[in-house]
Amino acid sequence: MSGRVDMTKGPLGGKIIKYTIPLAVTGILQQLFNAADLAVVGQFSGKEAMAAVGGNAPVIGILVNLFVGISLGSNVVIARCIGQRDEAQVSKTVHTSVIVALLGGILVTVLGELFAPGVVEMLDVPTEVFPLAVKYLRIYLVGMPVILLYNFESAIFRSCGNTRTPLAALVASGILNVLLNLFFVLALGMDVDGVATATVIANAVSSLLLFAALLRTDLVVKLSVRKLRVHMDVLGQMLKIGIPAGVQGMIFSFANIIVQSAVNSLGTTVMAASSAAYNLEIFSYYIMNSFGQACTTFVGQNYGAGENGRCRKALGLCLLQSAAGTALSCGLILTFSTQLLGIFTTSPDVIATGRVRLGYIFFAYMFSFAQETLSGYLRGFGVSFIPAACSVIGICGVRLTWIFTVFRRWPSFETIMRVYPVSLGITALVILAVTLIVRPSRRYRIAKDSAAGNP
């Protein structure tokens, strides 16, 4: 199939770029779902609706990140089995992943609907925003089964080197999402309920397109409805890698809820500005994150094939390319930050405050690209707990401590923003030190030689 990258043979530099660009664009398009929601309600429904949509981001994250982490486990297991040429295990993992996505999505929907008001209340949103925030969250939660299904399906395609098919599905659904946003809000007079409904429909379309592609593909990850079942042996492998990553994401999102609550306490203008800036900075994040995911998949396949030298080379190239891509994207967004923030709002105060956030966050990204790539490298070898623990302590621990101590002493938006470079800088240094100590490529080469009876 067009778009597949053979990771175990040939030069790596061009292949990493070929794999990463569609992956980064896919992440950006996913974020454009929320950005389109924010822009439409910001321009046509007011800053209260805009704050309601943007303020839900940490809540949504804490609900979905466990299963997104498990999808990463699926990616690693399939990539390793492909490197080992074990097609039977690949098939079992693919079919298990689809069932886990659907059942997990239903569980998240049910639990989320039960606790939606209480979760939004934790965010300390202004009184005028609260009903809109709850309404948006309830509708968004209905789409969790298809949202998680899309993430697992994307992980399946990525594991065999195909990042173009998920991108194509998202392009189609992203265009649909924008059109539906405008239709529901402008033609039908809806507000946050309109953009939430549009997002759910668009995610359903993207997941169905990928499901159909898996049924038709000639790759080893081909799906058969008759084979859909949970295989406990591969589920255990997926969970061993995926649960630490998922728990890390959940705790990370919980820490973001505390940070978001501090932001919300400063008023609607700061809340709206932070939401608008987030929907710009996330584009640069997806670029660096795509190199982290690329490192995971390239290392996973080459580790499965016994090519540990290529694993180390993939790490070095991913670090260099991630640094260049992140710097370029941050520079462009900062240069045009006033115009880009103006897409979401016409308020000068919101735009000015949003530019403050962008400055601090992009400075923090000087450390974040290394943290993302090194974590991806470790996970490619199946080492998932270590990067998760480092991130929980270094990012979440520092941010929570900062909000409950430093911010209480100096309660300003700048005080909140300073925690990002501090926490990410500490975490990057810790993960670098751990990687140098663990040296996973050497460790697994020794284990392989011992298993083969070599001295």
Image: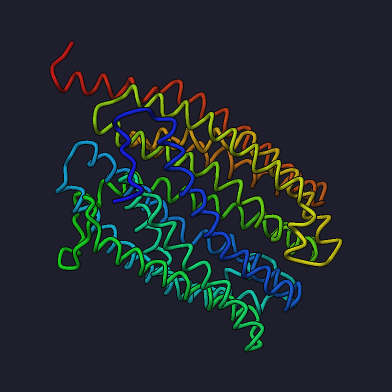
Q: Quadrant of residue 216?
A: bottom left
Q: In the displayed structure, does residue 221 sit left or right of residue 353?
A: left
**158 in relation to 228, above or below:** above
Determine the residue positioned at 51% across, 59% down.
Answer: 62
Determine the residue positioned at 49% across, 54% down.
Answer: 26
Determine the residue positioned at 39% across, 62% down.
Answer: 150
Q: In the displayed structure, does residue 322 sit left or right of residue 310?
A: right
**118 in relation to 407, above or below:** below
The colour scheme is: rainbow
Q: Nearer the viewer, residue 142 or 35?
A: 35
Q: Nearer the viewer, residue 277 or 232?
A: 277
Determine the residue positioned at 52% across, 26% down.
Answer: 432
Residue 248 in the image, given as x and y percentages of width and height: 48, 47
Residue 404 in the image, given as x and y percentages of width and height: 70, 49
Q: Nearer the viewer, residue 27 or 162?
A: 162
Q: In the displayed structure, does residue 317 sit left or right of residue 124?
A: left
Residue at the limit of the structure toward the top, as seen here = 455
Residue at the limit of the structure toward the bottom, as seen here = 188
**266 in relation to 82, above or below:** below
Residue 201 in the image, given as x and y percentages of width and height: 47, 76
Q: Which part of the image, by quadrant, shows the C terminus? A: top left
**201 in relation to 327, above or below:** below
Q: Quadrant of residue 254?
A: bottom right
